[in-house]
Image (cartoon, rainbow, N blue to C red):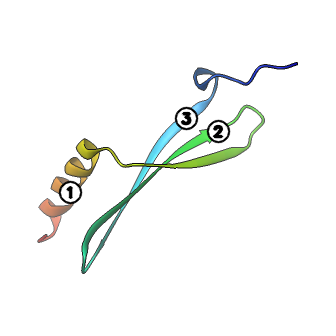
């Protein structure tokens, strides 16, 4: 029997995509996990409010929102 690797044994990255269209800014976030055997898996996750606010400030500073 083998134990599943813990999150600390893996390379885990949070990725957020921001899309601007006529309806406003849309956010999509996912967790990318690089497994020890070389595979990559992703999980959708909610975008944190603080991250949405920071990205909105950055994007609106560059464009008229």
From mark 1 to mark 2, how far is it between C-alphas? 29 Å
Q: Position of residue 55 (x, y in %)?
A: 24, 53
Circle 1: is it few (<14), some (14-19), or many (20+) Cα within 10 Å? some
Where is residue 31 drawn, in percent x and y? 52, 44
Quarter residue 37 falls in: top right
Residues at marks 1 and 2 touching, judged by CB atoms closer than 8 Å: no
Q: CA distance from mark 2 to mark 3?
A: 6 Å
List the residue tagged with mark 1.
Answer: 56
- Residue 36 vertical placement versus 62 (above, below): above
Residue located at (21% from left, 48% from top): 54
Residue drawn at (25%, 45%) of the image: 49
Of the image marks 1 and 2, the number of the one nearer the N terminus:
2
Which residue bears the numbered disc 2?
34
Q: Is residue 24 above or below residue 29?
A: below
Q: Quadrant of the C terminus?
A: bottom left
Label 2 vs 3, first from the N-terminus: 3
Residue pointed to by mark 3: 12
Q: Are marks 1 and 3 in contact (CB under 8 Å)?
A: no
Label 1 or label 3, whichever comes before in sequence order: 3
Query: On the picture, is 9 further left or further right than 17?
Result: right
Marks 2 & 3, CB-CB < 8 Å contact: yes
Query: Which residue occupies 56% across, 44% down?
Result: 32
Q: If the image is split into quadrants, where does the N terminus sit? A: top right
Quick one: SS at disc 3? strand
Q: Residue at x 12, y 60 (%)?
A: 61
Q: Residue furthest bottom?
A: 22
Disc 2 residue crowd, few under 14, some 14–19, many 20+, Cα 10 Å: some
State the residue in front, 41 or 60.
41
């Amino acid at each position: 029997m083998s134990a599943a690797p813990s999150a600390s044994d893996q390379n885990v990255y949070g990725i957020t995509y921001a899309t601007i269209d006529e309806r406003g800014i849309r956010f999509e976030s996912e967790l990318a996990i690089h497994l020890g055997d070389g595979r990559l898996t992703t999980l959708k996750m909610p975008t944190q409010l603080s991250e949405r606010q920071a990205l909105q400030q950055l994007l609106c500073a560059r464009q008229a929102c």
